[in-house]
């Protein structure tokens, strides 16, 4: 089986590609290194990497038409929510238009399977928690989440009209090796520079389900193998939540910093930044009913990721 | 109060603008005449009309910044669902990107109210009928509806981040004077040319709620006056449905054609075209609870519109 992965130098894809290659798939990756890192690009005889921007529909269509992959894992996206609030066309271009291009290239080349990394952020600030997949209305509060909702809608419309099968996963916070952003990544890099002060966005009460990336990928692959509707949509999360205050304390501890010697400054409001959803709890029963549950809890995922990240960035930021 | 109306030469807006002017508002209209007709542009001392494409963000921002309207009625869109299936970037550009531009221009100029014409098509083929506003998941089956869902998500995200209040109306099939498209418009124009044969898309069993445009505009204005959340979203429909078979028979009758002398050819499937949702029933209880109900039933709306349309197109198509 031949697979195309977008965002191939990013966090999720760089963890996925070695797994795909273990089953001796031929894998093709695309990234423009906007968020992805050259250090995360896999080297393997069955892996070919292409550097270009997915906004280039012509280049993308040419690649997809020539390679004719059996399946596309479309993982490319901006993943920095606050960035998308500053530059209002950022998620529109890097999320919505790129996803349209991926679908259009697939339609052109007759490719019939797409796996998409959506987000629990599409629910906005939902009235029901834990929030199930059939929750409505979908009123996102960030341009990042608006783009994810727009991508989902494009995917289901293409699926209906052009004989495409799709797996849409609404992620909790995915953590693990090869981060490009996120609270643990930021804390570790900032604490390397400054061991006596840490400024935290939000009051630390923010609580979200953190999913270890290997669990996330297990769940995605399990869904592909076992859910065979035209449109398959699952929350991908864990049942417990971890607070930013816990992440702060555990990171300080893992960096070998004495808690008494560091001035941790929290914000006044639970919202870390405009468009942030401070309390997230996703209903995971649909995945459970399909037969899959994550191995690690949120707390375990966070603790392991803090260890991974301290180790991975021991010598400073990666490029 | 100063109001900006997009799609000002289109069906809904050309019915709205005379109403707005009765309350001596200053009204500014924009249209590019892609679907809108010059014949539908209102002439009035308090109405100024600008011809340009809303994809031109610079022109739009300049206009909005200079005019500083109190409210935007954003009614511009492609309304031909099958067209959007043939040209896959059509609704993306004319719907999603245009709506982003409208919101971005509003953000730039500090405009804080937007009224948006969405569609019951966002529900795709829903498992629950009549379908309520909080129905999920939102899996549209046409690129038209995907764009409406994307626009809604952009609007709620801008509303949250940039202090904008929005009214999102998910329409049934709106009918009345000044049509630019739709089954009645098409039947009347085709029966003018050919009185012995009519080819109908779909098997005629398609059943949808048809809303008279004056009811639609009453409902929208009632919602603006009485629903004052940051995000206000309502189905705008009627309780009964009309079938395409009924519309066919009533139009033939209104054209003075003997039913026995015309060969009406129906399709095999209820779906009129790819992406069409053949059976639509929208839950109208949210509008009813707010205190508003339409005056005309679906059947009355259709019959009146057939009469209007036969009269309006007596001398042929308008430009």
Image (cartoon, coloured by chain):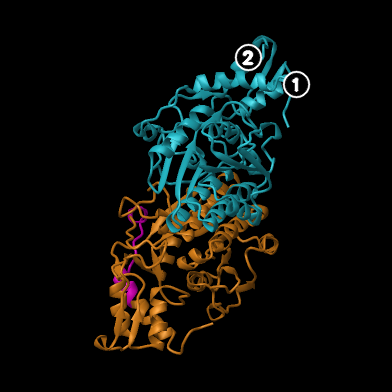
Chain colours: A orange, B cyan
Chain containing the residue with disc 2: B
Residue at image point 35% right, 68% down? A210
Q: Is residue A294 above or below residue B7?
A: below
If the image is split into quadrants, where does the C terminus of chain B sit? top right
Residue B170 rendering spot, x and y as whole percentages: 48, 38
Judge left or right: residue A22 versus residue B93.
left
Kindly state the secondary structure of the residue where label 1 is placed: helix
Q: Badge 2 local density, few (<14 within 10 Å), some, or many (20+)?
A: some
- For this orientation, the residue located farthest to the left is A260
Kindly state the secondary structure of the residue where label 2 is placed: helix
The numbered dot on residue B150 is none
Instruction: Specify whether residue A291 is painted magenta.
Output: yes
Residue B269 rendering spot, x and y as whole percentages: 58, 30
Judge left or right: residue B2 versus residue A220.
right
Residue A121 rendering spot, x and y as whole percentages: 41, 58
- Label 2 to label 1, Cα distance in Å? 15 Å
Residue B123: in sight, yes or no?
yes
Q: Is residue B162 above or below residue A196?
A: above
Judge left or right: residue A82 versus residue B198.
left
Residue at image point 43% right, 84% down? A312
Give the number of marks.
Answer: 2
Q: Quadrant of residue A300?
A: bottom left
Residue at mark 2: B254
Residue B169 rendering spot, x and y as whole percentages: 47, 39
SS majority, magenta: helix
Q: Which residues are magenta?
A: A284-303
Q: Is residue A43 above or below residue A64?
A: below
Judge left or right: residue A148 versus residue A260.
right
Instruction: Specify whether residue A298 is painted magenta.
Output: yes
Residue at mark 1: B193
Residue at image point 66% right, 34% down? B41
């Amino acid at each position: 089986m031949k697979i195309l992965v977008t965002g191939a130098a990013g966090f999720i894809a760089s963890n996925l590609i070695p797994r795909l290659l273990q089953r001796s798939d031929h894998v093709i990756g695309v990234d423009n290194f906007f968020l992805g890192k050259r250090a995360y690009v896999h080297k393997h005889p069955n892996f070919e990497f292409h550097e270009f921007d997915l906004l280039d529909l012509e280049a993308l269509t040419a690649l997809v038409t020539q390679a004719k992959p059996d399946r596309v894992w479309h993982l490319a996206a901006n993943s920095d929510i606050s960035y998308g609030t500053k530059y209002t066309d950022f998620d529109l271009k890097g999320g919505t238009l790129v996803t349209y291009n991926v679908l259009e290239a697939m339609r052109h080349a007759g490719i019939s399977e797409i796996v998409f990394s959506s987000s629990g952020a599409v629910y906005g600030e939902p009235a029901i928690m834990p929030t199930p997949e059939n929750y409505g209305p979908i009123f996102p509060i960030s341009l990042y989440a608006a783009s994810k909702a727009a991508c989902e809608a494009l995917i289901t419309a293409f699926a209906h009209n052009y004989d495409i099968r799709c797996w849409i996963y609404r992620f909790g916070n995915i953590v693990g090796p090869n981060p490009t952003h996120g609270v643990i990544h930021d804390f570790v890099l900032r604490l390397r520079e400054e061991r006596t002060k840490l400024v935290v966005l939000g009051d630390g009460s923010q609580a979200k389900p953190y999913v270890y990336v290997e669990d996330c990928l297990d769940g995605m692959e399990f869904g592909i193998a076992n859910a065979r509707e035209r449109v398959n949509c699952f929350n991908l999360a864990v049942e417990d939540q971890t607070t930013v205050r816990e992440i702060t304390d555990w990171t300080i501890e893992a960096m070998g910093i004495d808690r008494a010697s560091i001035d941790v400054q929290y914000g006044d409001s639970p919202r870390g930044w405009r468009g942030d959803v401070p309390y997230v709890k996703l209903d995971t029963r649909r995945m459970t009913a399909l037969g899959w549950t994550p191995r690690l809890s949120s707390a375990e995922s966070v603790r392991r990721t803090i260890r991974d990240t301290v180790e991975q960035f021991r010598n400073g930021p990666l490029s």
